[in-house]
């Protein structure tokens, strides 16, 4: 679907068009990603290698540590970059996410770190993460 078609659909939409609109937007987002061009291949490869090194950099955590995302390795909405979290537990046996769809980047993700963080209203939440994506808060 072309950009002009999406704009027309948005401006003329009513509740009955919502499903069609949603499908069109999802299709558009997917096709934009597929058409993405890598401008500087050497830089792209260098970045990939850098992130693999960061991901594989071992950090030992224990309950009570304050942690944050490693730069470039945030793969969840929460916490934000530089937002401090507290280690609740380091799991001896990781949990593997088998509930996510096969095409999801979360499918089979190793979850071996339970973190606590504060919500917008000060509520305390706990979530599981891949410890390779975190580092001690500076």
Image (spheres, grey):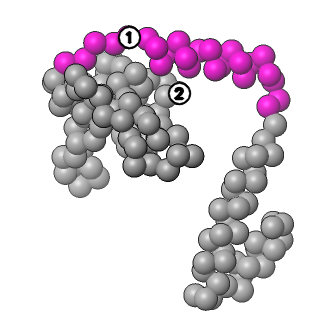
Which type of secondary structure does the marked residue at label 2 adopt? loop
Q: Is residue 110 above or below residue 43?
A: below
Which type of secondary structure does the marked residue at label 1 adopt? loop
- At label 2, counting other C-alpha atoms closer than 10 Å, the crowd grade (few under 14, some 14-19, many 20 or more) is few
Q: Residue at x 38, y 41 (%)?
A: 97
Please say if the residues under marks 2 and 1 sit with CB atoms less than 8 Å apart: no
Q: Residue at x 76, y 72 (%)?
A: 6
Indicate whether residue 46 is drawn in magenta. Answer: yes
Which tag is nearer the camera, tag 2 or tag 1?
Answer: 1
**Which of 93 and 53 lies nearest the eye of the viewer?**
93
**Which of 101 and 121 lies nearest the eye of the viewer?**
101
Q: Position of residue 1 (x, y in %)?
A: 81, 67
Q: Is residue 42 above or below residue 14?
A: above
In the picture, residue 49 is in which quadrant? top right
Q: Position of residue 32 (x, y in %)?
A: 75, 51
Q: Residue at x 65, y 69 (%)?
A: 23
Residue 6 in view of the camera: yes
Predominant secondary structure, magenta span: helix
Q: Residue 116 shows which numbered tag?
A: none
Which residue position is annotated with label 2? 72
**Which of 97 and 61 lies nearest the eye of the viewer?**
97
Left or right of 35? Residue 120 is left
In the image, which residues are magenta? 38-62
Q: Is residue 25 above or below residue 132?
A: below
Indicate whether residue 48 is drawn in magenta. Answer: yes
> CA–CA distance between discs 2 and 1?
16 Å
Left or right of 42? Residue 92 is left
Residue 82 in view of the camera: no
**Which of 50 and 81 lies nearest the eye of the viewer?**
50
Q: Position of residue 94 (x, y in %)?
A: 29, 28
Q: Residue at x 24, y 33 (%)?
A: 114
Which residue position is annotated with label 1? 58
């Amino acid at each position: 679907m072309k950009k002009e078609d999406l704009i027309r659909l948005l401006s003329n939409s009513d509740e009955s068009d919502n499903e069609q609109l949603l499908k069109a937007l999802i299709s558009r987002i997917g096709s934009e990603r597929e058409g993405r061009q890598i401008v500087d291949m050497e830089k792209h490869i260098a970045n990939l290698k850098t992130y693999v090194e960061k991901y594989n950099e071992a950090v030992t955590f224990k309950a009570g540590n304050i942690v944050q995302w490693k730069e470039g390795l945030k793969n969840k909405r929460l916490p934000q970059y530089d937002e401090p979290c507290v280690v609740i537990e380091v799991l001896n046996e990781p949990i593997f996410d088998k509930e996510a769809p096969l095409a999801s980047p979360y499918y089979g993700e190793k979850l071996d770190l339970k973190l606590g963080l504060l919500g917008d209203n000060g509520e305390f939440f706990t979530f599981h993460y891949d410890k390779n994506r975190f580092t001690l808060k500076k």
